[in-house]
Image (cartoon, helix red, strand yellow):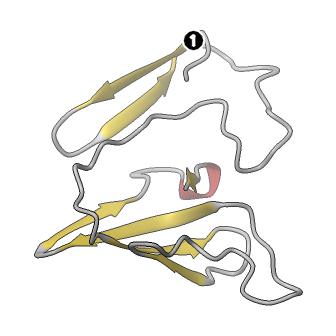
Amino acid sequence: MLPDGITSTSGPRSATLTAHADLDGIATGGYARSDVAVDLELDLSPDAEFLGFAFTQFAMPVVARRNEAFDFAPAHNLRSPKCVLPLAVRDGERCVLVAPLTSPHEQIITV
């Protein structure tokens, strides 16, 4: 999902979004509902494990694995949007780190 003025390029190790114009009026009104995004296909097994740090709860660690989704509400008084930064993925002997290369406070990873 890319609005006008943004292009996406990807290679074997990265995906890049580039704005070629000023962007006005693209806010979705929901923190974890991005209007500008790139989908990543990591070709993972069902046994892959995920570790992320909740973007809005002081980097609270959240994990996911087979039959266990990320828990963004671990206590009655803690609730976070479903977004992390960064995201580490372990699949057998293979590990992948998903994180922005620049401007980390302006980007999120929705899960």
Query: Quadrant location of the C terminus?
Result: bottom right
**Rendered position, 37 above or below 5:** below
107 left or right, relative to 47: right
Where does the image place residue 52, in percent across and percent down from the top left?
A: 49, 73
Direction front: furthest residue: 67
Residue identified by numbered label 1: 5
| The quadrant where residue 41 appears | top left
Q: How many marks?
A: 1
Quadrant holding the N terminus: top right
Residue sitting at x 22%, y 61%: 45
79 relative to 37, above or below:
below
Identity, as a three-letter code, of the amino acid under mark 1: Gly
> Could you say where residue 7 lies in the image, as x and y percent from the top left?
44, 18
Horizontal and vertical percent for residue 36?
Answer: 59, 30
| Rendered residue at 75%/79% (across/down) | 73
Asked if residue 111 is positioned above or below residue 67 in the image, the reply reads above
* Closer-to-camera residue (18/82): 82
Residue drawn at x 22%, y 49% as measured from the top left = 43
**Outermost residue toward the bottom in this view:** 75
Q: Taking 22 as reference, is 91 left or right? A: left
Secondary element at image label 1: loop
Whether residue 2 is situated above or below residue 96 in the rendered picture: above
